Image (cartoon, rainbow, N blue to C red):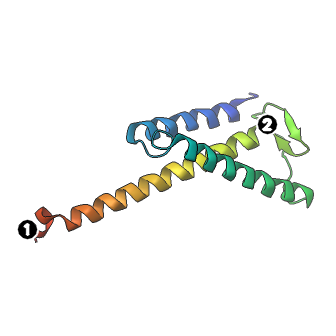
Amino acid sequence: MPGIYLIAILASAAGVLLIDRRWRLAAWQAPARTALAVGIGTAFFLAWDAVGIATGVFVKGDSALLLGVDLAPHLPLEEPVFLAFLSYLALVAWSGAVRLTERRRADAASPRSEASR
């Protein structure tokens, strides 16, 4: 079914967006910085793909799940969407891990946790 891969990426991105919104990890905390980071990450991975395509390392396989729209030889439309999703997911995961680590450190240093030892 053409387009199912793009739908899966967009549905996954919507889930990450909801997580981000709930805990204000990236886009809801600093929208411009998040957009810049996702843009830079996507551009970096597209350049990486271009080098891989030029050297023959990356080739587009045949799949009925792709829309069939190529932005360049061996670069399907879904690729930059996936790379943006990957960059955003990494940013949200990193922000969540930093917040969790900070919270655990703060809990460990609180007087209440000292009294329970």
Vertical placement of residue 55 versus 76, above or below: below
Q: Which residue is mark 1?
A: 115
Residue kind at label 2, given as amino acid type: Leu
Residue beneath the point at 54% across and 33% down: 14
Query: Is label 2 in contact with label 1 (beta carbons under 8 Å)?
Result: no
Name the spot of residue 52 as percent of width and height, x first: 84, 58
Q: Residue furthest bottom?
A: 117
Q: Mark number for residue 77?
A: 2
> What amino acid does circle 1 point to?
Ala
> Tag 1: Cα neighbours inside 10 Å, few (<14), some, or many (≥20)?
few
Q: How many numbered marks are there?
A: 2
Residue at (73, 29) in percent of width and height: 3
Q: Nearer the viewer, residue 117 or 24?
A: 24
Q: Is residue 56 left or right of residue 31?
A: right
Which residue is at a point 38% across and 55% down the rendered structure image?
99
Q: Nearer the viewer, mark 2 or mark 1?
A: 1
In the rendering, at what x and y percent does residue 26 appear? 49, 45
Q: Quadrant of residue 100?
A: bottom left
Extreme left residue here? 115
Q: Quadrant of the N terminus?
A: top right
Residue 94 numbered mark, or none: none
Residue 106 x, y percent position in the rendering: 26, 62
Helix, strand or loop for disc 1? helix
Mark 2 surroundings: few (<14), some (14-19) or many (≥20) residues within 10 A? some
